[in-house]
Image: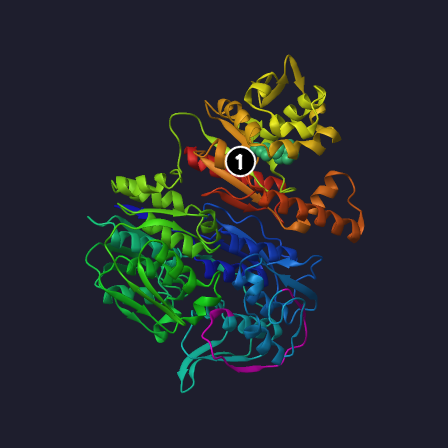
Amino acid sequence: MIDVRVPGDKSLTHRALILASLAEGESRLTGLLTGEDPQATRNALRTLGVPIGVLPEDGTELRVSGVGLQGLREPTQLIDCCNSGTTARLLLGVLSSQRLVAALTGDESLRRRPMRRVTEPLSRMGAQFRELGVRGCLPIEVRGSVLRPLEHVSTVSSAQVKGALLLAGLTGGVDVSVVEPVLSRDHTERLLRAMGVGIHSEHTDQGWQVRLSEPPSALPPLDFAVPADFSSAAFFLVLGLLLGGDASVRLVEVGLNPTRTGLLSVLSRMGATVEVDRESDDRCGEPVGTLIPHSGRLQGTEVTAAELPALIDEVPALVALAARAEGVTRITGASELRVKESDRIAALATNLRALGVSVEELPDGLEVEGTDRPLQGEVRSFDDHRIAMAFGVLASLPGNRVRIDDRAVADVSFPGFWRLLDGITSKHGNAGGRGSARSAGQPASGLNRKRGPIITIDGPAGSGKSTTARVVAQRLGFRHLDSGALYRALTCALLEAGIPPDRWPALDRADLDRFAIRLEPRAGNFAVLLGQSVLDAELRTSEVTEHVSQLSGLPAVRSWLLERQRAAGASGQLVAEGRDMGTVVFPDADLKVFLTASLEERARRRLEDRAVPRSGPAGLRDEMQRIEARDDRDRNRPLSPLRAPPGALVIDTTGLKFEEQVESIVRHVLDLTGC
Ligand code: DC
């Protein structure tokens, strides 16, 4: 049996970061989740003037010096909440009462999600919002105001709405009462109570009422060990129930807040056995314990509206289980799922159908008929971490052959998910499971023992991949392979030989063999040689830069350079940087890093690199347009388009110092190599 401590709770990580920022004095937080969503909260808080360091990947302590309930600073840039609805909604509440103007935005999917459920009651408190794009959606500008007390009856049970209103009351110093049909997750209340704030919760005729009364003028610092996330543990609960044989995993230190563990009662109705061993001490009011799933026969069941708030995030995992249970599982009253990271009802139905599972999509739910036939086919993540992970569990089961288009999205809430999944299924002796994953073109992650480690680094223009790759290689004592230099060298050679670019598409292998281009290992990198000459400054001329992308789009050229690149990685100890390093050249790399940063940040860095830091807003806008155009071209090119390779560690470097970003990669590699 394997002890698994899944990453820290996402909801609690967001709230701990926000409350520690609003406290006075130094808070101590451990076990924080480092996924993309909490990074968005962390970056937003930094933009608002809170000096928060890097979220430690290994769950060790982060100290946060709070700025006080009214101490946030007016941001100089748009706050990008990326894909995180919690970040956006909770911050709308916090910012409502601050003496500043700020604008929040998010990625394409977040910009489609409804915000009025938060801004409408906040407006009644006196907060001022301006919708800058589509009605009711981000981007939204918030102008802090003096707030009035609020009595709100919500038609949806939503922890984000409730949390936003309580945080507005807290920072604005006014009483707030929120009534919701069914008690939604109550993390905000529990943490506030642990910090000494007067919060009362009771069941009334109208539903659950939560009251914040006489909020304090200052919050004490928070000392909090964030429990492991029940929603992440849910995928391994389902895996443990489906794997067969003896219990395969023990999920330790899992948060067992009763507003989150509705899945456990549904599982028990389905005939599943899950041992629950509660720890005697709570953490800031949050119960914690160990879960051990035992495999056995599972029956379909009915899940209705009243149960959903306590298992809303677990529906994808539950549906994966339902696909393997006997009979029909019917979930209704779940229309909220249509406005999650994806339309989860449609996404689950589409994917199940693609695997040959009988499923009916209902307006507010799903009806799934379980099957024990092997599941085969291609599914999509729909840019939704929980969809990718739910189907990842099915893909890892013996006999199934399931291919998932984008696995990297799991990083949003669960960095390291695929490695853990593979580790458990392989330890379980599940050859079928691993085989199916590999046959799907998704190599098992983990350290390749036959050679030294290979790390790949890619990212869009201006993400800082070149410098990062070079410094990471230096820190690890590995060699750095700048694959772009090979494309540049060939461009240089062709131009020197007088072969015009319009003849390049006709070049074949024999033509290319005439150019003696090779890589020669040096202490810290590979020199690119043309004949006997080392090429360096020649590679960066404007003529080469102008023509190289044309050359790199040619299939014959790419396959010709492939052998040279692979040879450079023969003995490992390599940091390979460039477009297809993690996908085509080294698909079995031990760690694939994909760097991102907001468009504005990348444009600013580019301008700084070119020593034009004071080019003004117009210069910045121009550069942003240039980068966006290049991103579009790179993403849409037919050969090796720009995207995070499956299983990549995606690091959003916005607001990160260069050393912090290097450190986080180095730490991952050292973890991997057990150093
Ligand atoms: O990173 P760079 O600017 O030196 O790359 C030069 C060109 O080669 C650029 O158009 C991207 C392309 N390239 C590629 O297609 N595949 C790689 N592995 C590396 C670079």
Q: Residue at x 74, y 42 (%)?
A: 608
In the image, residue 253 lies at what x, y percent? 35, 55
Residue farthest to the bottom?
A: 205
Quadrant in the picture for the C terminus:
top left
Q: Which residue is mark 1?
A: 580
Regarding mark 1 in the picture, which secondary structure is present there? loop
Quarter location, residue 541: top right
Q: Is residue 154 magenta?
A: yes
Q: Nearer the viewer, residue 552 or 234?
A: 552
Quadrant of residue 578 in the image? top right
Instruction: Point out the stretch of residues depicted in magenta.
Output: 139-160
Q: Is residue 103 left or right of residue 161?
A: right
Q: Residue at x 78, y 53 (%)?
A: 617
Residue 287 drawn above or below residue 451: below
Q: Is residue 279 visible?
A: no
Q: Is residue 351 magenta?
A: no
Where 200 falls versus 467 (above or below)? below
Crowd rating for badge 1 (residues with CA inside 10 Å; few <14, some 14–19, many 20+): many
x, y percent for residue 420: 36, 45
Q: Compare residues 100 and 108 and report the one nearer the observer.
A: 108
Query: How far across and down, in percent of the image, does residue 17 sit?
Result: 53, 58
Callout 1: CB less than 8 Å from ligand 1: yes
Q: Position of residue 217 (x, y in %)?
A: 60, 72
- 70 with respect to 610 (left or right): left
Residue type of the residue flagged with mark 1:
Asp
Looking at the image, residue 329 lies above or below residue 524: below
